[in-house]
Amino acid sequence: KRSRRGSILFGPVNLEDHEGAFAANYDRGNGIVDGIEGTIGNTPLIKLRSLSEATGCTILAKAEFLNGAGGSPKDRVALNMIQVAEEQGLLSPGRGDTIYEGTVGSTGISLAVLARARGYKAHICMPDDMAIEKSDLLHHLGATVERVPVAPITDPGHFVNLARTRAKEHTAASDTPSRGFFADQFESLANYTAHMKTTGPEIHAQTAGRLDAFVAGAGTGGTIAGVAKHLKEERGLGEEVRVVLADPQGSGLYNKVRHGVMYSPTEREGTRRRTQVDTMVEGIGINRVTENFEAGRGLVDDAVKVTDEQACRMARWLVEHDGVFVGSSSAVNCVAAVVTALKMPSDSRVVTILCDSGSRHLSKFWKHIAAMGLEDETREQDEDLLAVLG
Ligand code: PMP
């Protein structure tokens, strides 16, 4: 049954429930926030009407693209990594420090914004096959950007290794007190704890603890680990909430979750030769187990593999039916949320994440969707979601 348009499903979020430091940035009375940091977190949970109707469940998507600094869940992570580093004296605004990071884009954008707001410089290393609008944006934010050829993680030229090296070089060469700080989102536990302290509690408050599944992809694994830890461990929901990994084609995590190994024997050779995850999707899918993913691995109950074609069709479907314009990782999450919902009793509640806006993906993902001819199809032709996803 269709709910009333725009109705509030679960009532307003009780900010008092938020354990995160971010709540301190809100003035609860009048909506005034203290700096750009105050626009991070407390994102709405959107009921996706078309997906809910098609599955007979309630599909709720956390609108993380509304985080106001960099427009993705990485705002939470970037703020937490900076705050932790400041507490440890690794970053200090008056010293002219530079934040270095290896990122496919979102974390770099969040760090570049927060660096500006707090008096740092940002130096971002990213693979050169990511959508150009991300590096353009970084330039406009005043960050130094190095786009490097795609390389295996064992290669010193891999974007993460390069960022680590650049930070060391900065500190070693500096004849002033200025330091280079390597944020290290893949291995730093300040990543998943940001989601454990904010994203997880918000989801719990918004659903009044009544959710049956949480579905998310993993780039660093911070989101899925942090939310799973909060819901299953801190809130004691355990088996009551199913945590499902949404994994794009070519990523090794699906096999890790389902079979305990990164590659199936038949995939092994081919996958190893490839230097990166073989998908058009940006931001999720990885062929190694990071510290952040490891932190939540025992809490991930299942995984769903999503093809690029399914992701493209879902992205198009969401615009057509819900007016929701998102990027590739959000589309993967929504496909996996639908697959998960269909395996659950009707009326189950499934929560997932809308990571970033489609406008970050115009030159690649959305160009591909247009080239597939999906934008020419009329609504009548794609009325059946399950047929559309195949
Ligand atoms: N979506 C996008 C667009 C991203 O950039 C990222 C992070 N790389 C993710 C999803 C995945 O989040 P996490 O790193 O927490 O696993």
Image: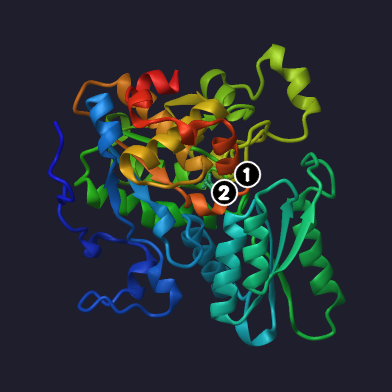
* Residue 212 appears in view: no
Residue 256 appears in which quarter of the rendering?
top right
Quadrant of the drawing holding the N terminus: top left
Rendered image: mark on residue 361: 2
Q: Is residue 69 above or below residue 3?
A: below
From the viewer's perspective, tell me whether residue 239 is left or right of residue 173.
left
| 362, 229: nearer the viewer | 362
| 131, 323: nearer the viewer | 323
Q: Is residue 333 above or below residue 261?
A: below
At x 62%, y 41%, the residue is: 290
Residue 261 appears in which quarter of the rendering?
top right
From the viewer's perspective, tell me whether residue 102 is left or right of residue 57.
right
Kind of residue at disc 2: His
Relative image position of residue 201 (x, y in whole percent) = 31, 53
Residue 141 appears in which quarter of the rendering?
bottom right
Rendered image: mark on residue 364: 1
Dot 1 lies on which element?
loop
* Residue 85 appears in view: yes
Relative image position of residue 106 (x, y in whole percent) = 57, 56
Kind of residue at disc 1: Lys
Rendered image: mark on residue 125: none
At x 68%, y 70%, the residue is: 143
Relative image position of residue 165 (x, y in whole percent) = 81, 60
Relative image position of residue 202 (x, y in whole percent) = 30, 54
Q: CA distance from mark 2 to mark 1?
A: 6 Å
At x 59%, y 66%, the residue is: 111
Q: From the Cβ of disc 2, is ligand 1 less than 8 Å away?
A: no
